[in-house]
Amino acid sequence: MKLDILVFGAHPDDAELGAGGTIAKEISLGKKVGVIDLTRGELGTRGSAEIREKEAATSAEILGLSIRENMEFADGFFVNDKQHQLAIVRKIRAYRPDIVLCNATEDRHIDHARGSDLVSNACFLSGLMKIDTKAEGDDQWQEAWRPKQVYHYIQWKNLKPDFVLDITEVIDTKMAAIKAYASQFYDPDSKEPSTPISSKNFTDSVAYRARDLGRMIGVEFAEGFTVERFIGVNSLSDIF
């Protein structure tokens, strides 16, 4: 299956928090979008890998994803090496996305920047013809494929975006997809330990950050991204 957009996250819920609105909007416009989580989030203080797997499936249904997969890399300990790069290359070549979205280039959690570098490196390597790969369970060699663009969503740190995307019409879908991870986020009745993302303030901050980014471009809600190279436009009227 060819995807228009492939989104990577170091942990289940990264994609929803950073780019859930963008995912929902692009799907509403007819794009095929998939999410690949690098780890099962097994080191998370709250919940478990099994619970988060079910929550990720629920979120995928809310967003309308074409595919959702998990690489099952080691949470907290995966590295940006040949083995992990080739595993990502196989996925990129299998789904041939035009656009890849991935973790923030720097952030509070060490897996985020590491995952960002890993996916970015793999996107480049995937376009090299002399790197041979086969998809899992397939005897056919994969053709080289390099996404046209790699964009990094913003996470815990309030990084300055290079561009912002209007998600006003899908903010409710974004928030519903996030709240599907009931084990991770605010629940006044939960007996689990508190974490930096389990407070009501954090959940509220997702919405008010989107509102603030929207305010900056004259819309209600938006999400921000950083880029790896200049963005080209056909006309000044393309920018609002």
Image (cartoon, grey):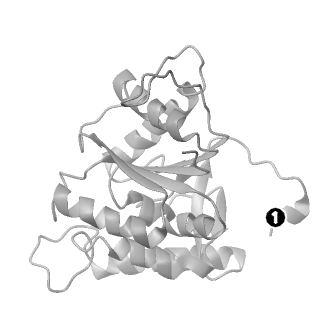
Residue 177 location, x and y as percent? 40, 72
**Label 1 neighbour load within 10 Å: few <14, some 14-19, many 20+:** few
Residue 180 location, x and y as percent? 32, 73
> Taking 206 as reference, is 145 above or below it?
above
> Taking 34 as reference, is 38 above or below it?
above
Most distant residue in the bottom direction: 188
Left or right: residue 193 versus residue 126 is left
Q: Secondary structure at mark 1?
A: loop
Identified at 28% across, 36% down, the residue is 78
Q: Nearer the viewer, residue 28 or 124?
A: 28
Image quadrant assignment for residue 168: bottom right
Q: Nearer the viewer, residue 193 or 15?
A: 15
| Placement of the C terminus among the 4 image quadrants | bottom right
Which residue, given by chain and number where applicable, does mark 1 sit on?
239
How many numbered discs? 1
Most distant residue in the top direction: 130
